[in-house]
Amino acid sequence: MHIPELSTQILELGEILRQKKYMLGTAESCTGGLISMLLTEVSGSSDWFKGTIVSYANEVKESILHVPHETLLQHGAVSEQTALAMVQGVQDALQLQAAIAVTGIAGPTGGTKEKPVGTVWIGFALGTQRFAQHHVFSGDRTDVRYQTAMAAISTLLHELKR
C-alpha cells in the first residue's frame, strides 16, 4: 500500500467517524505515535481524532492504560491479552467510541522463536465491541512500523463500513 492510498483511507475513515459522531484515539507501543501522526496529517482530523497514549514501556501500559501486571507477566507485552487491555485502557482514559492499540516487536532486536521480530498485535474497540488481530510483518524496523499502522487504519475503516 502506498501513502497516497493510505491518505485516501484516512479521509474516508475520518468522514465515517464524523458521520457517526465517534472520536478515535490510539494506544501505541511499537509504532511510537506513528498512527496518530498519519491520522493528523489530514486537515480537519481534530473533528474525529482525540489523541494518543504512547505506552512504549510496560510501566506506562500498567499505570496509564491499566493493563494488569499479571497480564504482562503471563502473556507478555506482545500478546492478544495486552492489546485488548490497552485498547480498553485508552478507550476509558480518553472517553472514546473508537480506539486502536498496537503492541509488537519492530526489531531488529527483541524477537524470540515464539515471537519473532515483526510480531504485532493490534487491538480495536468500537463502542463495547473489542477484538484483536495478530500479524507477523517482514522487513526492517521502519517497514514493520508502517505495515502495523496501515493494517490498523485499514482494518478500522473496514469494520466501520460493515
Image (cartoon, rainbow, N blue to C red):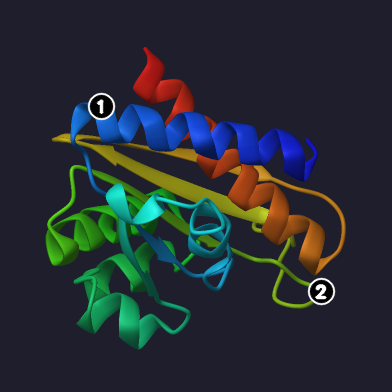
Residue found at x 65% / y 54%? 119
For this rendering, which residue is in front, 149 or 131?
Answer: 149
For this rendering, which residue is in front, 110 or 154?
Answer: 154
Q: What residue type is labelled 1?
A: Gln
Q: In which quarter of the image is residue 61?
A: bottom left
Within 10 angstroms of label 1, few (less than 14), some, or many (20 or more) residues?
A: few
Residue furthest right as drawn? 139
Q: Quadrant of residue 66?
A: bottom left
Residue 67 on image: x %, y % = 25, 68
Q: Taking 97 as reference, is 54 above or below it?
A: below
* Residue placed under numbered mark 2 in the picture: 108
Residue 150 on image: x %, y % = 63, 43
Q: Quadrant of residue 50?
A: bottom left
Within 10 angstroms of label 2, few (less than 14), some, or many (20 or more) residues?
A: some
Residue found at x 68% / y 60%? 145
Q: Which amino acid does label 2 sit on?
A: Pro
Residue furthest top as drawn? 162
Residue 130 on image: x %, y % = 26, 37
* Residue placed under numbered mark 1 in the picture: 19
Residue found at x 35% / y 71%? 72
Q: The N terminus lies in which quarter of the figure?
A: top right
Mark 1–mark 2 distance (CA, rounded to whole Å): 41 Å
Residue 94 on image: x %, y % = 18, 63
Q: Taking 21 as reference, is 115 above or below it?
A: below
For this rendering, which residue is in front, 60 or 5?
Answer: 5
SS at badge 1: helix
SS at badge 2: loop
Q: In the shown orientation, is residue 147 left or right of residue 2?
A: left
Q: Taking 127 as reference, is 78 above or below it?
A: below
